[in-house]
Every structure is written in structure tokens, then in C-alpha cells.
Amino acid sequence: MGLKDATVRIRRLAQVGSGAFVEKDLIVTAGHVLDAGGRDPVCSEFSIVHPVSGHKWSAIAIWIDPRWRNESDPAGDIGLIRVRPSTTTTVLVCGAFTGGVVTRFGYPASPHDPLGASATGSVTLTASLLYATDPNMQIPGGASGGPLVESQGQLVGVGTGLGVSCRRALQSEEI
């Protein structure tokens, strides 16, 4: 049980993204995954699917960082979704991070990766953004919001795909 077990696919209308459980009933993802399309995400229902187990949830977004909602600031590209708790859910623990090697994971919209795709690369932390110069760290469509974990498996960010190398870093106190 680990990264793949904690990661889910998020869908609303034609929008697709990824996210990761940080509590048995709480999923973290990119803010733009939740507010795509200009509708009020806090009032919208999302379909959550765990592609490995096939488990499905209906969910509602409960929070999007105001920096993203109000200004589309990449430093605030983060959101949370609440689902009915599941006893079989794998939860990622948030960890402190100052830079180094991370692994990203998500469920791209491509039918070639129905069970997810990952990549590993070096990143540096600047303010609240992780920057990667490794082209392997680019976030494919549908994988936005997927977890970024450090070598011990602790969650340190979410993939945002904004620009070529910008990823949202998490501070554990935000969750």
C-alpha cells in the first residue's frame, strides 16, 4: 500500500484531474482541478474513482485556497474535497521538504495510462512553489492535483502543471 493506493481520479463534467487522500475522508488536489469551467466549485459535485480498486465516491469541494480562487496565484493552487470515509483508504502523511528528489503520480486523461503514471526528478523549493527542470516532471493532462512525495513516501506537494516546471508545495499545517 502506498502512493498508487492513496491516489484517485477526480471528474466533473468533462474536467479530469487527480488527487490524494490525506485523511480517510479528505482528498487534496490542485485548486484548478476543482474550479475549472468557472462554476462555483464549493457547490459542485465531483465523481471520485480509485482506478485500482474501482471504489467510487460522490464528493463536494470544501475549500480552495483564496489566492487561487481570487487571483489564480500558482502559490495557492490547492483545494480539498470531502468524501464519505472508507476504512480501506490509504492516507499519505504530509512531510517537511526543502528540495531534492520527488516522485509525482496521477491518472492522466490518456487511455494509454489507465492505471496511472509516475516520474521521479529533482526539484527545488522557492517560496511555496517547487521547481523542476527535469522534463520527466511535466504534469500530463488529467494528472494535475496528483501527489508529489519525497523518498520516504511523505506528501510534499501536488502537481499543478502550470507552466513547464511549477508545482505546488504543501505545508502540512495547511491540511
Image: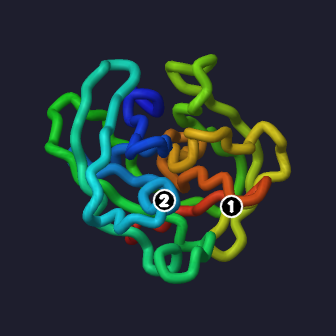
Q: Earlier in the sequence, mark 2 or mark 1?
A: 2
Q: Residue at x 40, y 44 (%)?
A: 13
* 28 left or right, relative to 166: left
* 43 left or right, relative to 51: left
Q: Amino acid at mark 1?
A: Leu
> Dot 2 corresponds to which residue?
37
Q: Nearer the viewer, mark 2 or mark 1?
A: 2
Res 42 label: none
> x, y percentage for residue 175?
35, 64
Residue in front for this viewpoint, 75 or 152: 75
Q: Amino acid at mark 2?
A: Gly
Residue in front for this viewpoint, 13 or 53: 13
* 15 left or right, relative to 62: right
Q: Residue at x 29, y 66 (%)?
A: 42
> x, y percentage for residue 33?
48, 54
Q: Quadrant of the N terminus?
A: top left
Up the image or down, 15 lies above or below 86; here it is below
Asked where in the image residue 172 lies, by quadrant, the reply is bottom left
Q: Residue at x 40, y 41 (%)?
A: 11
Report how far apart the C-alphas of labels 2 and 1 lie in the structure: 26 Å
> x, y percentage for residue 122?
76, 47
Up the image or down, 122 lies above or below 54; here it is below
> Dot 1 corresponds to which residue?
130
Asked where in the image residue 109 lies, by quadrant, the reply is top right
